[in-house]
Image (cartoon, grey):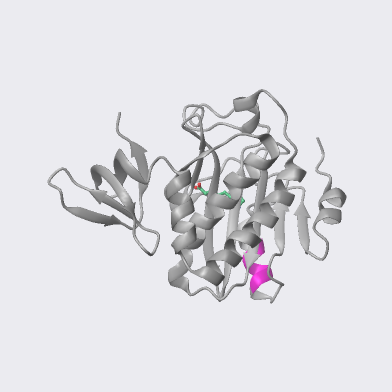
Amino acid sequence: MAFDLEWVRSRLPGRPIHWHTAIESTMPEASRLAAAGCQSGTIVGSEEQTAGQGRYGRAWHSEHGSGLYVSIVLRHKFVPATLPLVTLALGLATSEAILKVTDISCDLRWPNDVLLQSRKCAGILAQLEGSAIIAGIGINVNHSAFPEELSGIATSLRLATHRIHSREQLLVELAAGVDRFCALLEKEGGEPILAMFSQASSFVHGRRVSVDQGHSMVQGTTAGLNSSGFLILQGDDGTKKVIFTGGVRPCS
Ligand code: BTN
């Protein structure tokens, strides 16, 4: 179904929304607008991305008309070191928008995966553009299938619920939630975000995981988040290590 941009605009008055039929990726377009001085909250979205970007240089599958693919320009008084906390806040906003619109609760896998039935239904990519943050959020909404290489690890809200969901309502809730969680982070610092993420995620405490760090794999049991939003992993010898980056997977 075609995206009803006018309905979204009527619910987000005053917010610039740049909507595309197809684009390589919303990320560079949002960066370009941010560099040109666009206002905070500006949204770049597209029905389809022909070169959607995931973390670690991976591609983000962005089938036409099925998902929500947006980048939101954020201008807050965050320093660059806050980026990991912003990523957690964006995960909370995404999961909350999904709950409000579809009534389904997602799990959050540090740092940026939103999971349903242990498969990824949304992902987040936060990048700096000067003093602005570009919050890239992709939600698999109404996909009825995924390419074979993703079928075991990805899902959509439709596949999980057997219902079609409104991408427009999701965007309205997402935009409001991103504003609210970022304002909270700006006003009260990382603590409430860390507490909410820890509460919402089954991966933060006591989970046996392996972490793919590109050059090596580490295994251990998760032992919370540090004050900067990084994951703490306790090795089998009891020593604790801070995980700054890497793909976290449960050990079976
Ligand atoms: C990840 O989990 O690897 C991050 C995925 C981020 C995907 C979104 S879709 C909208 C925005 N544009 C992109 O090219 N990527 C982000």
x and y percentages locating residue 43 in the rendered image: 71, 59
112 lies above or below 85: above
Residue at screen point 65% across, 55% down: 177
x and y percentages locating residue 241 in the rendered image: 23, 55
Left/right placement of residue 23 relative to residue 206 reads: right
**Residue 8 visible in the picture:** yes
Quarter of the image with the N terminus is top right
Determine the image quadrant of residue 161. Answer: top right
Left/right placement of residue 35 relative to residue 3 reads: left
Residue at screen point 63% across, 58% down: 178
Quarter of the image with the C terminus is top left
Determine the image quadrant of residue 206. Answer: top left
Q: Residue furthest top?
A: 162
Residue at screen point 38% across, 42% down: 203
116 lies above or below 46: above
Out of 201 and 123, give the one closest to the viewer: 201
Left/right placement of residue 43 relative to residue 214 reads: right
163 lies above or below 237: above
x and y percentages locating residue 151 in the rendered image: 51, 27
Out of 225 and 119, give the one closest to the viewer: 225
Question: Magenta residues: mostly which secondary structure?
Answer: helix
**Residue 213 visible in the picture:** no
User: In the image, is residue 30 part of the stretch drawn in magenta?
Assistant: yes
x and y percentages locating residue 129 in the rendered image: 56, 71
Give the total of numbered labels. 0
145 lies above or below 65: above
Span shown in magenta: 29-34
